[in-house]
Every structure is written in structure tokens, then in C-alpha cells.
């Protein structure tokens, strides 16, 4: 059955769509744009969100957002395919050319730190640091240019039928062949569709803020494994850094309540003077940390992407990158279904997406949990061996290249947009 086939007579009173994307964050908007590119007409594609991004607001006009992402090369390509990259690239993005990683037991500078350099891959950079709000605004602007519609309402009910899903959103009713849940870790779509999820609390909270440093960041992403957590300094375009400081929740709460001077003293200690004296340049925010894995990514005419399907620890900066790969993979599967004249919501089509992305996401989540257990918070013999082994990666070109390729999103089975 083609994407534009008619629905059964009993649902003609509903507003008919081929695809309903629930969630107007960066992952949901990217999914909508890539599905449009895959062959879903914009007029038959709607994005639902309680508060859609306002129309006519340029990303450059937004205030600075403390929540930032380290976007990989694969993510850059996907965002370019979605038509949003030019606006993102022009708005406060900071490329990083190196990654500098060390354990708290060794000095930050010297042969015992692990350093990745874009030049080793023949690349201009390893990725870029971009604000969440910038991504959302640029993607929303691209969606509106494409003619994709927005519905300012929560999805309150979801009823699955053989040939469609009925949605109640505010006072209106919709019928769609495919519903995409891109509504975050507390996904209402996941709940309404009866898709369970396993959740594990890390017992940690991430603190984020902007920091001015006495020494230049040198377009380098810095990360120190602390023994009780992880501290990352991400280079911003204006010379400052965005920090992600993942700590046991009790300590994080104490630092959040501390004076700016006390906060900076603790931060300088944990960062071991790697960039000299520090200065707090913004407010401080916190995010509780947990891991989440949906039992299934798909069910009849419903698919989950991004945090609705999986949440990982931020220490590797892969959350948004995995979500964008989900969006591109789902678009590939739908495009193949359209080419084969298949029903785009058929479960056999959606299962291809689940098999593809679940294996990739589970591999990354397991690796990140290993870094957290062994490098960031580990003690004991195995953890000590892992921590002491970091410098040896510098002298193992094949292992080092594998790390860089994975961090840049260039390893594994890539969707078409990530290969452009």
C-alpha cells in the first residue's frame, strides 16, 4: 500500500496524515525533515508538541542555551541532509579539533593523557559543539520552509488499528499510518503504545555551566575521569567552555547550592589546573542521570527514536548523535518501503529499523557504561588496569583510529544521510 493510500471510511472524520511525529525537539524535527526527504509529502506530515518552536525566529537571535551537544561528523551530515546545517553552522558553533582525556591519578599534560587529533584522520575537526536551542530553531525553520505542519497540543490518547493509529490531541482527532515517538525519556507515546522500558539510575547528577578559562581551550574537548565521576570542558566559539560535571548526586547538590567562589574552587581542583584559573560565566543547571532502554523500539504503526528509545550517560557525548542516527535510519527504512510499494506503518517495515538501530545503540550504551564503571568511578584490579591502559592507546594506531571513527559516527552500519 502506498504512502498516500486512502484510509477506511470510519476514520474520515479524523484529520488524515501519513506520519505524525510527536515531539518538536531536535530529534523529532530531524525525523520529520528526513521522512519528508524520503518521500512523505509535507502536507501529510505533522509534528505534535505542547510548545512548538515559534515561527520566524532565527537561531542567531536566541539567548545562549547552557545545554550543548558535541555533534559528530555523521550528525553534521544528517543535519545537512535535513536542510538545517547552514543556519546551525552560522550560529555560535565551536568546532573541536582534538580530544584530551586523562585519569585523575595522572597529570593533565604529559605522556599519560590520551589525545585524539582530527589531523590523524585527515579531517578538519572531530565535530562541533552546538546549543540545543540553536539546533531546534534551525530545524524548525527548515521544517516550516518545507511545508511541514505543527500542531500545538499534547497527544492524550493513542489507539492502534490494523490500518492506522488514531490520536487525540487537544480537541482534535487525527489518523496516521505511522506515529513516531520523539518525545523524550518520559515518552507519552511509548507509554500509550504499551512499550515498556528498563531504567537504571546512575546515582549521579550532571552540572552544566559556562566557564571562562585563563588559558585558551585550543579547540580541544577536555575530559578528566575523577574517581567519583567525570568532568568535561567543551570548547565554545567565543573562547569559553561549557562544562558537564557528572558527580554523585549528594555532592552535585552541595556544589549547586555553594557560592560561586566555592563552586569554582572545587571545579579548579577537579580539573587539576588544565586550563589555568577559572571563572563562572553563567548560572548553574543540573540534570539527573540514568540509563534507559525501551523493551522494543516499534510496535504496530509506532516507532520510537532518540531518548524515547534509549538514554545513555553523557560522558561520551553521544546522546544526540545516536538520536540523529535513529532519525536517518528510520527515514531509510520508510524510503525503502515506499519504493517497494509497502505500507509505511507495517510492522515488518518497522522491524528493520528496530533490528538496525537497537544493535548499534546497545553496543554504544554498553561501551559507555564500561567507561563509567571502570574509568570514571572504578576501583579494584580491573578498573586499575583500564585506567593505566589509557596511555597505551596513544601507541596503538589501529585502536586509536577505531576510537576516533566511533566518536565521529563513522563506524558501524550508517544510514544514507550519514554517508553523504
Image (cartoon, rainbow, N blue to C red):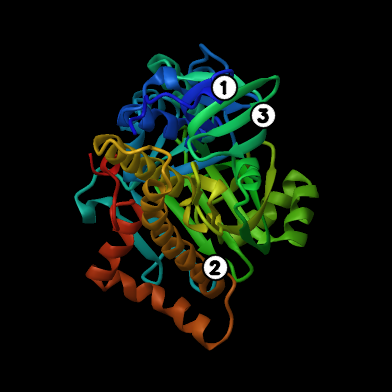
Whether 179 is drawn above or below 270: the answer is: above
Answer with left or right where residue 403 lies relative to residue 212.
left
Q: Position of residue 91 (x, y in %)?
A: 43, 25
| Disc number lying in front (2 or 3) | 3
Which image quadrant is residue 266 in? bottom right
Q: Position of residue 70 (x, y in %)?
A: 44, 45
Q: Which residue is mark 1?
A: 53
| Disc number lying in front (1 or 3) | 3
Counting residues from the start of the chain, the first of labels 2 and 3 encountered is 3
Seen from the viewer's position, the closer of residues 372 and 114 is 372
Count neighbours of disc 3 (C-alpha within 10 A) and say few if under 14, some if 14 to 19, many if 20 or more: some
Task: Residue 192: tell me if it is visible.
Answer: yes
Which image quadrant is residue 111 in? bottom left
Determine the CA span between mark 1 and mark 3: 14 Å
Q: Which residue is mark 2?
A: 372
Whether 279 is drawn above or below 19: the answer is: below
Determine the secondary structure under disc 2.
helix
Q: Looking at the rendering, in which quadrant would you find the C terminus?
A: top left
Q: Are the two marked residues, 2 and 3, in contact with CB atoms closer than 8 angstroms?
A: no
Q: Looking at the rendering, in which quadrant would you find the N terminus?
A: top left
Counting residues from the start of the chain, the first of labels 2 and 1 encountered is 1
| Disc number lying in front (2 or 1) | 1
Amino acid at each position: 500500500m502506498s504512502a498516500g493510500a486512502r484510509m477506511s471510511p470510519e476514520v474520515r472524520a479524523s484529520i488524515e496524515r501519513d506520519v505524525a511525529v510527536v515531539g518538536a525537539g531536535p530529534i523529532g524535527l530531524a525525523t520529520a525533515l528526513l521522512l519528508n526527504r524520503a518521500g512523505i509529502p509535507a502536507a501529510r506530515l505533522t509534528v505534535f508538541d505542547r510548545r512548538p518552536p515559534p515561527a520566524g525566529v532565527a537561531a542567531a537571535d536566541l539567548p545562549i542555551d547552557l545545554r550543548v551537544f558535541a555533534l559528530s561528523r555523521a550528525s553534521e551530515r544528517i543535519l545537512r541532509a535535513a536542510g538545517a546545517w547552514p543556519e546551525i553552522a552560522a550560529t555560535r558553533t565551536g568546532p573541536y579539533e582534538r580530544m584530551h582525556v586523562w585519569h585523575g591519578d595522572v597529570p593533565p599534560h604529559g605522556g599519560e593523557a590520551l589525545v585524539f587529533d582530527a589531523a590523524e584522520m585527515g579531517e578538519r575537526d572531530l565535530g562541533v559543539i552546538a546549543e540545543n536551542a540553536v539546533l531546534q530553531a534551525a530545524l524548525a525553520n527548515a521544517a516550516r520552509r518545507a511545508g511541514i505542519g505543527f500542531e500545538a497540543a499534547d497527544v492524550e490518547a493513542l489507539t492502534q488499528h490494523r490500518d492506522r493509529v488514531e490520536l487525540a490531541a487537544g480537541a482534535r482527532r487525527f489518523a496516521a499510518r505511522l506515529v513516531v515517538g520523539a518525545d523524550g525519556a518520559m515518552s507519552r507515546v511509548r507509554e500509550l503504545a504499551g512499550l515498556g522500558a528498563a531504567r537504571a539510575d546512575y546515582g549521579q547528577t550532571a552540572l552544566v555551566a559556562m566557564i571562562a578559562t585563563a588559558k585558551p581551550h585550543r579547540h580541544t574537548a577536555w575530559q578528566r575521569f575523577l574517581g567519583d565521576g567525570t568532568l568535561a570542558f567543551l570548547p565554545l566559539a567565543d573562547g569559553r567552555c561549557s562544562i558537564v560535571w557528572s558527580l554523585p548526586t549528594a555532592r552535585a547538590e552541595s556544589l549547586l547550592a555553594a557560592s560561586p567562589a566555592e563552586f569554582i574552587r572545587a571545579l579548579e581542583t577537579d580539573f587539576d589546573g588544565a586550563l589555568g584559573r577559572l571563572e563562572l560565566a553563567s548560572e548553574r543547571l543540573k540534570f539527573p542521570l540514568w540509563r534507559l532502554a525501551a523493551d522494543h523500539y516499534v510496535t504496530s504503526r509506532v516507532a520510537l527514536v532518540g531518548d524515547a528509545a534509549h538514554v545513555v550517560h553523557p560522558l561520551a557525548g553521544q546522546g544526540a548523535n545516536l538520536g540523529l542516527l535513529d532519525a536517518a535510519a528510520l527515514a531509510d527504512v520508510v524510503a525503502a518501503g515506499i519504493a517497494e510499494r509497502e505500507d509505511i506503518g507495517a510492522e515488518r517495515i518497522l522491524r528493520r529499523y528496530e533490528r538496525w538501530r537497537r544493535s548499534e545503540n546497545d553496543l554504544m550504551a554498553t561501551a559507555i557504561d564500561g567507561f563509567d564503571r571502570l574509568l570514571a568511578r572504578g576501583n579494584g584490579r580491573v578498573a586499575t588496569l583500564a585506567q593505566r591502559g589509557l596511555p597505551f592507546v596513544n601507541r596503538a594506531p589501529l585502536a586509536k583510529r577505531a576510537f576516533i571513527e566511533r566518536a565521529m559516527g563513522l563506524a558501524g552500519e550508517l544510514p544514507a544521510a550519514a554517508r553523504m
